[in-house]
Structure formats: structure tokens, C-alpha cells
Amino acid sequence: MTATIMSDDHRERVRRAFVAPGEFTTSPLYRALSRTVADEEALLDLAASGRSGQYPTFLFFGAVHHLLLTGPQDPLGAYFPSVVGPDAEALPAEEAGPALVAFCARYEAELRALVADRLVQTNQVQRSLGLRFGLAAMAEEIAATSDRPVHLVEVGASAGLNLRFDRYGYRLGGRSFGDAASPVQLEAELLGDGVLPDLDALPALASVQGVDLSPVDVRAPEDREWLKALVWPENHDQRLLLTAALDVVAGDPPPILRGDAIDVLPGLAASLPPGEPRVVYHSATRMHVPAHRLAAFDAAIAGLGESGPLWWLSVEDAPHPDPRPDPSRGGAALRLRGPDGSSRDLAVVEGHLRWLETLPTR
């Protein structure tokens, strides 16, 4: 393989990401292959060649998966449940390392191009549940502030799947919400003793708008295949759900601005009618922002509130401090910052919104 010059610090950061990849909770294959990458300098070199801020494990395995799903057959595919199909048994994950090394040697140029050009992007339509829950939780507060409909902005919108949250059905805590006839039905386990808001009592929307570094065209086969490649190989049901959501959104794609949120949001803020309420949502987006740009990213989002009341909803970090009696489940905070600048955690959620734990109202 062709070597790329990189700093020792950068290489070590990438290596650490593969040494303990706690994010792959539902992918034994990626956990096993991560150890191979951590031990192979040539694979680390490939994984480290992405854009600044991109999480190397997601990006590298997304590129490998994409080639396996769209390219010629390769022996590595026999270890991927997504390649062999749900009705066949993949080869043992623990034995896949040598096949990965050989695959990366054969397709180095293609992998390097994908890692350098593509981004890790939202493909978890299940995260629409976090947006809907948040909107329901803030509905009364918004109504008390303004009688105008809300302008919804998603940062890191990818294909705009979350922005079409109103086209899906939901099931949570034995109750159904949303569109019962939709081909996209999202179900999550409900935990906790907090109050579940009425997910059908939502503020009216005046507009929806996405922002993304590299928007995904839901009507372009190559873009759709990239999002599917970002689904972990074992998650067959999620892949089917993503395909259904892409089909729904392709019928009416939401507008998505191309560009860095830091650069794009000031202009978007200026275009919103003064005084009208706005909600910004981002999920697993801030984690991909380079550390030296985080303050500017946060300031750009806060700037949406300079000309009108802003509710800032996010799914990014673990709650701190964790208010739950038993925090061993882990999870991220569904966090809401209101127009007065105060923040509160509405719930704790699994990163892909497979479960949601409500919190007592303070």
C-alpha cells in the first residue's frame, strides 16, 4: 500500500479509536476487525486519510462495506452478514482479519478515494423519534411564547430523513403516534418514570430546512448505497427501514443547504422572519466537528436565536450529571436549550434511539 505522511499524534488517535471501539454494540464483526486495523500500519494509514473531524472507525468500515456491497465479489464478503444475506450464515467474525488485510491491499485506491471524499452521515431514521419527542415536549412552551408556526432547521441533515419525521408512524410505551399507514414504522422501548408527552400534539411547522457539508441526494443510487453501507453488517432490519425511509423522502425531498454550518447558518438566520420561533436539531453531528471549531459551531447555532426565540434540541453527549438511579445502561441526553439559555435533559436515549428513558420533570 502507498504510505501517507501523518503526525505521530494523529496516527495514535486513530489507533486508539480502533483499539477500543465501544460504539459497535451490535456489530461483533466490526469489533473483531477493529483489532486488525489497530495492529496494521497500512490499514491505519487508510483509516486516517479522511477529512478532519470524521470518526475513523465509521468512515473506514463504511468504505469497506460500500465496496463489498457494490463492487465485485471478494472473499471478505463471506464474513459480512449483509453480503451473504439474512438467510445464510456468515463466516466467524474472529477469523476475518487476514481477509480484510488482503481486501485493502487489492482495493487500496478505491478505498482511499472513498475515505477522502465521503463523510459519515446520518442514516438512522430512528433518530426522528428524538426530534418528535422533543417537539412534543416543547409544544406548550412554544405556544406560550408565540402564536406563529415554527421554522425547523436540522444541522447534519444528510438525506433529510429526520426532516420528514411527520411522514412516519411511531410506537412507544404501547401507544401509537403519527402516520399508521406509513411504510416507515419506528418502535422503541420506553423506560423511566417520567411523563411521556403526546407525540401527536406538535407545534405547526412554517418551514423545514437542512444543512449538511455534503447533502445526500435520495434520488441518486450512489448516494443511497453509501448510506446503506454505513449501516453495520449485522443490522438487517435497520437496512430495510432505511430503504423504506429513503423511498418516502424521495417523493418529497426537503431543502438542504450545502456547506459548513459555521458558514451557512448566519445567512439562514438572516432569512428567517424576525420574531418567529425556530427549532434547531442535531444528532450525532457535533462529534464530527473538529475540536478547534466546536466553539464556532455552537456560536453559529446560537446565532439562529438572535432574531427570534430559539429552541435548541440535540442528541450528542451523555447526561452530566446522570440523573437516573441506574446509569449503567449508558445512553445520550436528549437535551433542550430554551430561548432563555437554560438547558434541561428531556430523556436519555440509546444512540440509535432503540430505547428512550424518560426523566422526572424538574
Image: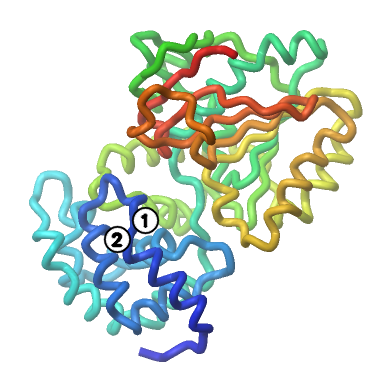
- Which label's residue is closer to the chain start, 1 or 2? 2
- Of badges 1 and 2, nearer the viewer stands 1
Regarding residue 251, the answer to whether it shows in the image is: no
- Residue 206 vs residue 113: left or right? right
Task: Kindly tell me whether residue 38 is visible in this rendering.
Answer: yes
Give the residue type at disc 2: Leu
Q: Which mark is residue 134?
A: none
Residue at 36%, 31% in the rendered image: 354
Residue identifier under label 1: 229
Q: Are marks 1 and 2 in contact (CB under 8 Å)?
A: yes
Q: Picture quarter containing residue 238?
A: top left
Quadrant (top left/top right/bottom left/bottom right) for the C terminus:
top right
For badge 1, the amino acid type reads Ala
Compared with 32, 272 (above or below) is above
* Residue under the point 31% across and 73% down: 38
Drawn side of residue 207 relative to residue 268, left or right: left
Quadrant where the image shows the N terminus? bottom left
Q: Examine the rendered structure and indicate whether residue 23 appears above or below residue 71.
A: above
